[in-house]
Image: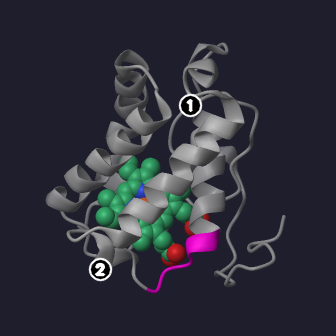
Amino acid sequence: APHAMPGEETVAPYAVDDRNAGAAPFVGDGMAKAFHGQDGIRRIVDNMVEFSFADAVIGEIFANQDKVRLKRTLFEQFCYILNAGCTYTGRDMASAHKDMGIQKADMNRLVEVLQRAMTAEGVDFQAQNRFLSKLAPMRRAVLQK
Ligand code: HEM
């Protein structure tokens, strides 16, 4: 698989593997339905990325990063984990966030941004919290060591 799609900046080669998504997918179609399928996940990710780039706290970390690639790979990751019918072709979480200096406060802010995007899509709170619980263990890989 290519390491970058048209419209994206190239990145250093890596092995493509669903395990790079950092979590095993949910079983069954309940979570995919709660997120309104791939269309809903696309809306959530697009909003989340736009909010993040514009955010007063974390916007600085996103500045000059590849927004086109981030929307694609984040969509794939969420879609894969929600069992909505995708594979993940992006990098693993440690490689993707290496040397960005991400602190706990940045992580908390990103979670708020994601909650805002999920609420705007009308995802119920139980499904929101189940999804956030899946992402929570990835903190260790994302935070600056
Ligand atoms: C559990 C939490 C997180 C998840 C699941 C996640 C997921 C991802 C994914 C899938 C990518 C794309 C990987 C690729 O390009 O191959 C990515 C990249 C990125 N993430 Fe995160 N992320 C998380 C936390 C954060 C936080 C807290 C920040 C900053 C506040 C952040 C900032 C970024 C930036 C700036 C990129 C672009 C990297 C680049 O283009 O080189 N992420 N993230």
Q: Mark 2 vs mark 1: which is more N-terminal?
A: 1
Q: Name the residue at 82% across, 70% down.
A: 2
Q: Name the residue at 39% across, 61% down.
A: 51
Q: Which amino acid does label 2 sit on?
A: Glu
Image spot of residue 25 (x, y percent) = 59, 28
Query: What is the span of residues highlighted in magenta in the rendered image?
Result: 64-68
Using residue 113 as the reference point, say whether residue 120 is left or right of it.
right
Image spot of residue 114 (x, y percent) = 38, 45
Using residue 93 as the reference point, say whether residue 30 is left or right of it.
right
Using residue 88 as the reference point, say whether residue 142 is left or right of it.
left
Q: Say which mark, if any, is on residue 60.
A: 2
Q: Name the residue at 22% across, 71% down.
A: 56
| Relative depth, front residue between 40 and 70 | 40
| Relative depth, front residue between 3 and 53 | 53
Image spot of residue 16 (x, y percent) = 72, 58
Q: Are marks 2 and 1 in contact (CB under 8 Å)?
A: no
C-alpha separation, residue under disc 2 versus residue under disc 1: 31 Å
Element type where label 1 sits in the image? loop
Location of residue 66 with respect to 141 vertically, above or below:
below
Q: Name the residue under label 1.
A: 24
Image spot of residue 28 (x, y percent) = 66, 13
Q: How many marks?
A: 2
Name the chief secondary structure element in magenta.
loop
Element type where label 2 sits in the image? helix
Location of residue 74 with respect to 55 vertically, above or below:
above
Q: What residue type is labelled 1?
A: Ala
Q: Farthest right residue?
A: 1
Quadrant of res 69: bottom right
Residue 25 visible at all: yes
Within-10-Å neighbours for mark 2: few <14, some 14–19, many 20+ = few
